[in-house]
Image (tube, helix red, strand yellow):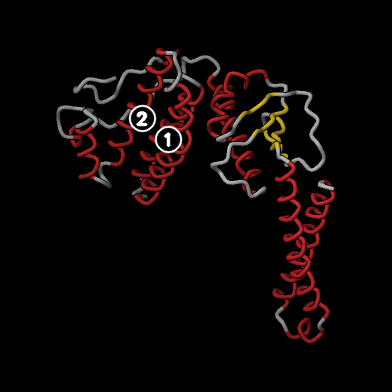
Amino acid sequence: MHGPSDAAPKIDSQALSIFALEVLARLNETIDAVAGAYREYQFNTVAQRLYDFFWSDYCDWFVEAAKSEIFSDDEAKKKSTLAVMDSVLSATLRLLHPFMPHLTEELWFLFDFGKDSIQFAAPPQKVPLEDIAEVAAKRQLASAVYETVEAGRNLRSASKLPSNRKIRFILRTNKNSVSGHIPTLTRLLNAEEVTLDSEYQAPAGTPMAVTSLGEIFLSITATDRTRERDRLDKEIAKTENDLRTVEAKLQNSSFVDRAPATVVEEHRRRLNDLNAQLAKLEQARAGLN
């Protein structure tokens, strides 16, 4: 960890995980974006970029992904991850200080980032990442893992499975680079297990999404399958009802003649969208038979 005079903890760039590398690269981009926005007096842009970085890139993704390293038995990885967390938090507090002076001052001393007031701390500098081998490839892999997690979460949500329920996912991929990150995928998906299987043949009706890592499948039980049938039946019934309503309006000559052309055109687009949506729902429902 850092001492009381270390506003920016030292980072071993050669020990960075792909997720630590990604958050540091995002921090560098944020520092550049904030500096540019200040030059243009776009203070709302500064605030938005800081909000997006801290809550999304840092809290939602990196902190959660980092737990696999923090709770591991590898002390080197744990130390490296904690140093990155300290460094990013220290930089974020300094960037936020003009907007939140009292809170950032309190946190600065609480985390022991420096002996003096945060207002006298130097602005954060970008972390040099140029010397790290294959930076772009590692960042791409981190983004692909996050993308796959989002796809898996969406499958869970669409299948009406609660987020706190442990379920199984299968990832059909030929990318060997992802094998070392299965613990992180499992944690971020709150899964019972994530299995890699390049030859996986999914049963008909298995929820699936395509990602840059490959196809991710949600393994569902017979009970889940019944629940999914019921959900699809309700969605189909609702879509058919909406479809009938729109069709009735378009078949009503009084509506077509009197309504503004833009409104009539919007209803026609809506009719096409509902027909396409109904076809997809019926296909998904047929797959569960």
Q: Which residue is drawn at 57% across and 22% down?
A: 181
Task: List the residue tagged with mark 1.
Answer: 58
Tell me where residue 8 appears, x and y as whole percent: 29, 24
Tell me where residue 97 appears, x and y as whole percent: 26, 41
Q: Which is more N-terminal, label 2 or label 1?
A: 1
- Badge 1 amino acid: Tyr
Disc 1, SS: helix
Give the quarter of the image for residue 243.
bottom right
In this view, the residue in front, 39 or 167, is 167
Locate the N terminus and report the quarter of the image it occupies.
top left
In this view, the residue in front, 2 or 130, is 2
Q: Residue at x 64, y 50 (%)?
A: 160
Tell me where residue 157 appears, x and y as whole percent: 62, 47
Q: Which residue is drawn at 46% across and 32% down?
A: 64
> Is there CB contact under 8 Å for labels 1 and 2?
yes
Q: As drawn, is 52 to the left or to the right of 125?
A: right
In this view, the residue in front, 238 or 147, is 238
Cα–Cα gap, marks 1 and 2: 8 Å
| Total numbered badges shown on the rendered structure | 2
Task: List the residue tagged with mark 2.
Answer: 88
Q: As drawn, is 192 to the left or to the right of 278?
A: left
Tell me where residue 261 appears, x and y as whole percent: 73, 77
In this view, the residue in front, 116 or 209, is 209
Q: Which residue is drawn at 53% across and 31% down?
A: 187
Question: How many C-alpha atoms fall within 10 Å of the one at disc 2: few (<14), some, or many (≥20)?
Answer: many
Q: As drawn, is 58 to the left or to the right of 143?
A: left
- Badge 2 amino acid: Val
Give the quarter of the image for residue 39.
top left
